[in-house]
């Protein structure tokens, strides 16, 4: 036998020393990315399905035997370098039945690229990577165990390791896996898979039979921080470790769901100007609520502004103050991150349909706090789905968006359509809720975003929507929906009445050199929020349930600034009882 390659292969085979694990495998077809993107109205899913577990160095010459290809369905091999090298090079090689000789143009892990709209009928393709370098990969669906994972890491020859589950695939540094997840791959795999499970739950993909075979994708990058793009989610090498921790209490569910949520933003119906960093966080909030350790980004973070800055729940309280109490338009509510427009620009003006008016407008613009804007969208999920008043609200809204042609609609039209879809999907009149939240208010403002644009809503459009909902005869939702949060949703579900005695359990305290009244939840039960009034009955402040409280939710610090006369405790149904004077 003269050929050294054939001689070496023959030697291994004759001596039962040839390991076919990963070198021999079957690979399946997946739905074409563009077709899936258009069907779900999202961004791209995984371009790198079918990891092979085979690694190539640049210049490696390998023989790949292929069997079972149908000429109608092209198949290729991608070698992708996700490592710390210039441009993270990628090369692709068309395959055919029989013998294929691959000379690697770059180093990297390899993937069988097999996409077709006819993926359900396309046959599986068998491949043999003869004498190739085995890196391996972890596959939860295949039944891989933590013991398998330890062996895979120990034998890895690539600087990047692939891990996949039913719903997601990741490509992270091998050395980081050894640092953050040396043993518990099954637990980590459940963390990343559950994230996508709950995002798809919000989207209603299983409910409407739309859940794709295709996975989402996340990978390491070597500059920047965290972001999403046409490939998937990405985290810089120094930050990716928070996505690699098997303990759910330490895994960064919010950030992981946030970036993957960018991919899942249903567009344009839930992705109009000003919502680029907001509607993806509907997923983040739900994932964190379902999988996290009981700390909530909106309700638990120590932040805020004004006399409630630097306090637990301060960001959620910005919405209650800026939107519900002050009545500011939804996209113009200030928060600790943004809210002070200082960019002076001149732009062509538009009307509510997005048509140029022929006039230029000079104005101050800037970003507004994305998390403050999230609060009312999060409240809809809590009230309807978690408290049970209209389960699967976003599933129904997104299905309506997926089945509607919204091309050419302006941001204002999309915002109005969203509110209409919420009412139609729930068969409830949420317009009073939207009015208090600031969405159903006139606005003519140039909002900043990745694609800034005019957001224009006039009284005419508002009156038309009110007339539409009135004609439908939808009842209003029960209760003070604008006060629901992750800390008090059970009160709405249980419809528990307020319990308390005037001034009992109320203690004077101080924060930011401002008087507060600390209200004990054991003395005042089932209070969803507290309202502070002056002697004339003017509402001075709203304090969310748990504002400034401890992790055990034992009390609320209620703002009681100069001029305050009394505090009203608010029940889930809008009942008000004097709590302190």
Image (cartoon, grey):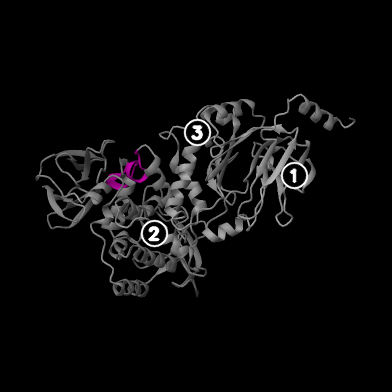
Q: Earlier along the polypeptide chain: callout 1 or callout 3?
A: 1
Residue at the spot of label 2: 331
Residue 395 falls in which quadrant of the image?
bottom left
Q: Which residues are magenta?
A: 294-309
Q: Which mark is residue 186?
A: 3
Give me the C-alpha separation between circle 1 and circle 2.
56 Å
- Viewer-nearest residue: 200 or 440: 200
Does 420 sit above or below residue 538?
A: below
Q: Nearer the viewer, residue 265 or 328?
A: 265
| Labels 1, 3: front one | 1
Q: Residues within 10 Å of mark 3 (few under 14, many from 20)?
A: many
The residue tagged with tag 3: helix, strand or loop? helix
Q: Quadrant of residue 522?
A: top left
Quick check: 36 above or below 300?
below
Mark 2 nearby-residue class (10 Å; few <14, some 14–19, many ≥20): many
- Spot the residue most to the right: 2
Residue beneath disc 1: 66
Residue 320 belongs to the span the image colors magenta: no
Q: Is residue 63 left or right of residue 561?
A: right
> At which x and y percent is residue 278?
43, 53
**Where 407 sits versus 337, above or below?**
below
For discs 2 and 3, the disc positioned in front in the rendered view: 3
301 drawn magenta: yes
Q: Residue at x 83, y 32 (%)?
A: 5
The residue shown at (24%, 56%) is 480
């Amino acid at each position: 036998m003269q050929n050294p390659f054939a001689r070496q292969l023959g030697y291994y085979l004759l001596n039962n020393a040839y390991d076919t694990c990963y070198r021999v495998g079957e690979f399946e077809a997946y739905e074409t990315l563009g077709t899936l993107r258009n069907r779900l109205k999202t961004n791209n899913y995984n371009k790198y399905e079918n990891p092979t577990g085979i690694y190539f160095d640049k210049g490696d010459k390998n023989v790949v035997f292929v069997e079972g290809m149908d000429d109608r369905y092209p198949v290729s091999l991608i070698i992708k370098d996700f490592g710390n090298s210039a441009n993270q090079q990628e090369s692709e090689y068309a395959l055919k039945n029989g013998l294929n000789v691959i000379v690697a143009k770059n180093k990297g892990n390899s993937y069988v690229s097999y996409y077709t709209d006819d993926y359900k009928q396309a046959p599986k393709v068998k491949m043999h990577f003869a004498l190739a370098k085995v890196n391996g990969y972890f596959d939860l669906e295949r039944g891989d165990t933590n013991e398998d994972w330890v062996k895979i890491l120990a034998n890895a020859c690539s600087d990047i390791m692939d891990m996949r589950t039913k719903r997601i695939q990741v490509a992270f540094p091998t050395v980081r896996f050894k640092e953050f997840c040396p043993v518990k791959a099954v637990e980590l795999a459940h963390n990343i898979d559950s994230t996508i499970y709950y995002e798809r739950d919000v989207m209603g993909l299983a409910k409407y039979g739309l859940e794709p075979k295709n996975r989402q994708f996340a990978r390491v990058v070597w500059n920047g921080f965290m972001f999403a793009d046409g490939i998937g989610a990405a985290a810089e090498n120094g930050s990716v470790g928070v996505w690699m921790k098997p303990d759910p209490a330490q895994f960064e569910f919010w950030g992981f769901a946030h970036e993957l949520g960018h991919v899942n933003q249903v567009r344009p119906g839930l992705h109009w100007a000003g919502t680029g960093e907001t509607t993806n966080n509907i997923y983040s909030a739900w994932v964190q609520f379902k999988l996290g350790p009981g700390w909530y980004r909106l309700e638990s973070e120590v932040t805020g502004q004004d006399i409630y800055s630097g306090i637990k729940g301060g960001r959620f309280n910005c919405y209650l103050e800026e939107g519900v109490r002050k009545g500011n338009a939804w996209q113009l509510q200030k928060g600790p991150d943004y809210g002070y427009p200082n960019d002076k620009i001149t732009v062509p003006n538009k009307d509510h349909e997005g048509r140029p008016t022929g006039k230029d407008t000079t104005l101050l613009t800037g970003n507004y706090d994305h998390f403050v804007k999230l609060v009312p969208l999060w409240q809809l999920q809590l009230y309807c789905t978690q408290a049970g008043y209209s389960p699967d609200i976003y599933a129904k809204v997104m299905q309506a968006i997926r089945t509607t042609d919204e091309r050419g609609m302006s941001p204002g039209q999309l915002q109005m359509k969203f509110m209409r879809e919420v009412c139609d999907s729930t068969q409830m009149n949420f317009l009073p809720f939207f009015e208090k939240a600031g969405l159903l208010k006139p606005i003519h403002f140039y909002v900043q975003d990745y694609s800034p644009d005019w957001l224009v809503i006039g009284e005419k459009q508002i009156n038309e929507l009110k007339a539409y909902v009135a004609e439908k005869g939808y009842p209003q939702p029960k209760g003070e929906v604008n006060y629901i949060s992750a800390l008090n949703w059970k009160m709405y579900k249980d419809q528990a009445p307020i319990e308390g005695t005037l001034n009992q359990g109320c203690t004077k305290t101080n924060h930011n050199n401002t008087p507060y009244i600390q209200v004990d939840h054991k003395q005042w039960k089932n209070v969803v929020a507290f309202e502070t009034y002056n002697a004339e009955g003017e509402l001075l402040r709203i304090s969310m349930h748990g504002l400034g409280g401890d992790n055990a939710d034992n009390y609320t610090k209620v703002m009681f600034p100069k001029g305050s006369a009394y505090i009203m405790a608010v029940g889930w149904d809008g009942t008000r009882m004097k709590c302190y004077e």
